[in-house]
Structure formats: structure tokens, C-alpha cells
Amino acid sequence: MKKTIVLLLLVCFCVLCLSACSPSKDPKDYFTDEEIAELDKVEYTAKGTVIAYGGGFDQNDDQRMIIVRKSIEICGKEQPKMLFMTSGHGDKIDGNENFIRHYTDAGCIVKTLQPSLESKEAMIEKIGEADIIYETGGNLNGLTQIWGKAGVFAEMRKAYERGAVLVGVSTGAMCWAEMGYDNSSEEETIRVITDFPFIGKEAEYDYYYATGILPFCICPHFDNIAYRHFGRKAKKLDVPSLAIENGAAVIYHAGKYEVMVDPTTPKRKCYLYFPEKGIKKVDVTEDASLVGYVDAYRRLNGYKAHDE
């Protein structure tokens, strides 16, 4: 009996210690009262929404439909015009048909866009009429080259300003941010590995500027062994970072952030880093209000999207 009580006390003590060591989510621990008062006054005029998820939500139809239903719900239209893009895969549609099928079955009018293969006029028209725009995973380096040459970045910002819902996974999540952290090879590398041993090609990583709608650096697949080292990088960056695990999605609208987690993988997390304010790996999964304050802080201090 005594041993049981001692063990229970030790467990309670460990839990309390872990709780005490967890970084605070309270904005007041990082910003002064005066700063918070100013940050609360920041106004957002853009009408769009971003759904950026690190990976996952793709093992079966039910998981994929979580993203589909959420984007349609946010859009609010009965029959949204949905634009499907695969620039992260070099504009190759083959092998990416599941989401096209799901959005079609959900009542959307679906079109595809391959910027490297279509005219600039067609690109502008398709992006300009879309209510929901979805970009797949793949390789951010390749995507930025395609979008840069075709003039896609500016059109995406316009779509966001007028109210489009911008959705993406992995590369498709990073492309809505100021920059993303990804494998630097133009060819996609096998790197989405969750279990030991790590099987895949070695990859070099780098930072790539993107649309800049979210004033963060995004790292996807943060629970995977090939991306965990980003935590060390994020503690030294000049810009704030969001490290998003598979099965977690960051949703942003008008300065407000929330994190949606796949109910079949409820332990997935999203972490915030911002060394300038002493924010180091703060778990914002259940309360993302601190992310909103960091966003406002950057905008108040003159943040602008990278000039492509």
C-alpha cells in the first residue's frame, strides 16, 4: 500500500513538473500590456481564409473529407468553384485525383490549373473565379519556380484579398506563407517517414519564399524524423515559425488562428517559434491566440510579402 502511494505521489510530482516546464501560451508572457493594446487594434481587410496542414488527412476517404467539408463550410457557397493545382508535383495531375473526386462529389464545380502548361490569361481567369484553391504536396522549390515564372504569386494574393479559401498540404501549406522549409532538390524526395528505420534518400533542406499571406515560416511533417531538426533551426530564425505535424491543420482568417486536428490522430500538434520574443516551441494546438498576436506584431512592424 505504501509503495502504491509513493508511486502515485511520484507520478503527480512528475506531472506537475512537466506542466511547470511547458512554455506559456499566454500572450502577456511575451508582450507588454502596451504592445497587446496596440496589437488588438490591428485591422485586417482581406476576406480570405487559409487552411494549411502539415500532412495526413489522407489515409482514407473519411480523412480526406475532413478537409473538403471544412473548406466548403468556410466558403459558404452552395456550389463553390474549386481550383485544383499540383505545382508541387511539377503540374502533373496523375496520381492526385482523390481530392478532385471528393470535391466534385461534395457539389463543387472543379477545374484544374497547370501554370507551366497554360497561358497567363487562362491562369488569371481560373484563379480569379475560384472560391476554393487547393495545392497538393510535393516540392516547394519546384513550385516556387513554376509560380514565379507564371506570375501566380500576385494572383493568389488577389484571390485571398477578395475572399477565396486557400487550402494546401505540405508544400501546399508552405506556399501560403512568407517562406517554407523543404528539401532543396527539384525532384521530390522520399522523406515522409514516421517510423524507424528511416528509409529514404538523403536530402538537403533550404528556405523558399512564397506568397507571404501568412507572415511565418512553415515546416510541415514536423513529427517525421526527416523534419524534426527544424526545431533547432526555428530557434535561430529572424522570422516566426509554425511547425505543423501530420494530422494537424492551421486555419487562418482575419488575424485569427485555430488548429484543427484529425480526430483519428488526436495527439498531433502545432508549435510556434519566435526567438525575437522568446517563444520557443509553444504548443498552440488547443489555443492558437498567441499565433494571432505574433501575426499582428509583424504586420504592425511593417511586414510585407517578399517581392518576387
Image (cartoon, rainbow, N blue to C red):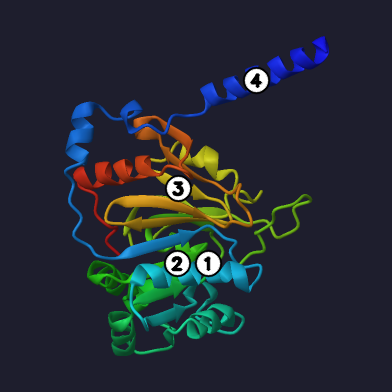
Q: Nearer the viewer, residue 230 or 289?
A: 289
Q: Is residue 82 visible?
A: yes
Number of residues whose C-alpha sits closer than 10 Å to that of mark 1, classed few (under 14), some (14–19) or many (20 or more): some
Q: Please report contact status of discs 4 and 2: CB closer than 8 Å, yes or no.
A: no
Q: Residue at x 47, y 29 (%)?
A: 23
Cα distance between the residues tagged 2 and 3:
21 Å
Disc 4 is placed on an element classified as helix
Please state if 62 lies on the left or on the right of 166 as rendered.
Answer: right
Number of residues whose C-alpha sits closer than 10 Å to that of mark 3, classed few (under 14), some (14–19) or many (20 or more): many
Q: Nearer the viewer, residue 106 or 33?
A: 106
Q: Nearer the viewer, mark 3 or mark 4?
A: 4
* Mark seen at residue 242: 3
- Give how far across and how far down residue 76 sits, in percent: 33, 73
Cα distance between the residues tagged 1 and 4:
37 Å
- Give how far across and how far down residue 44 sits, in percent: 20, 55
Q: Residue at x 32, y 51 (%)?
A: 256
* Mark seen at residue 12: 4
Number of residues whose C-alpha sits closer than 10 Å to that of mark 2, classed few (under 14), some (14–19) or many (20 or more): some
Q: Earlier in the sequence, mark 1 or mark 4?
A: 4
Disc 1 is placed on an element classified as helix
Q: Amino acid at mark 1?
A: Ile
Disc 2 is placed on an element classified as helix
In the picture of the structure, the residue carrying the numbered disc 2 is 70
The image quadrant where one finds the N terminus is top right
In the picture of the structure, the residue carrying the numbered disc 1 is 66
The number of discs equals 4
Q: Is residue 187 visible?
A: no
Q: Which quadrant of the view contains residue 29? A: top left
Cα distance between the residues tagged 1 and 3:
21 Å
Q: Which quadrant of the view contains residue 133? A: bottom left
Q: Which quadrant of the view contains residue 237? A: top left
